[in-house]
Amino acid sequence: KKHWKRSVLLTGPSAAGKSRLAAALVAKGWRHLDGDALAKSLYRPGSRLLSSVVKAFGKTVLTESKHLDTVRLGEIVFPSLAQRRRLNRLVYPAFLRALRAKLRLGSRPWVADVAVYFDAGTPDLGLPVILVEAPVALRIRRLRAKGLSPGRAAARARALRFGPQERRRADLVLDGRQPLRANVARILHHLGS
């Protein structure tokens, strides 16, 4: 479809600047696909996925109303690579099916904000992959400004690792410290707009 030529996938660690870039593209008429929100929608009470997560991590990951307690689950998985991998094996197959289905909808271009793209095995989604980076210290400050405790901010900032291999596999790498307008211009230039 024609809109795929202008759609993009933003990835990168927490608080690198993906959401700001996505918002700037939405202001230009693109549709936003929030990968975190999509993943959370899969954890409906009574769903097979939520049951699997509870079986793997215990009932403490449920709220009193039987919804997923994402804060509690984050406290378990962000500090531990083994626990994140365990969660990923449960979540990624369903997440990727839902992501592909969503991207097929409509005719306007998408900006998909999917922090876990490389973690999910770099699936072929037919979109240019834009890696947004920022130093860990800056990302921790940004997460603290959103209300996270120092420990949770540090764990989340360090949870997803992006290094030389991910930079090589990305179609474009942006520095999240750069002015928003400059990064949007680089995206549009990359897309030939």
Image (cartoon, rainbow, N blue to C red):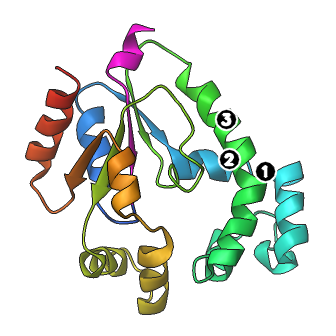
Type of amino acid under label 1: Arg
The crowding category of the residue bearing disc 2, from other C-alpha atoms within 10 Å (few below 14, some 14 to 19, many at least 20), is few
Asked if residue 100 lies left or right of residue 43, the reply is: left
Tell me what residue is drawn at x 65 percent, y 69 percent.
70
Disc ID at residue 41:
2
Tell me whether the residue at label 2 lies in contact with that at label 1, contact meaning CB atoms closer than 8 angstroms: yes
Q: Residue 61: where, in percent of width, then height? A: 77, 74
Q: Is residue 9 in the magenta section?
A: yes
Disc ID at residue 98:
3
Disc ID at residue 1:
none
Asked if residue 168 lies left or right of residue 182, the reply is: right
The quadrant the C terminus occupies is top left
What span is in magenta?
Answer: 1-12
Mark 2 or mark 3: which comes first in sequence? Answer: 2
Q: Residue 12: where, in percent of width, then height? A: 38, 57
Q: Is residue 57 above or below residue 16?
A: below
| In-front residue for pair 46/178 | 178
Type of amino acid under label 2: Ser
| Residue corresponding to mark 1 | 44
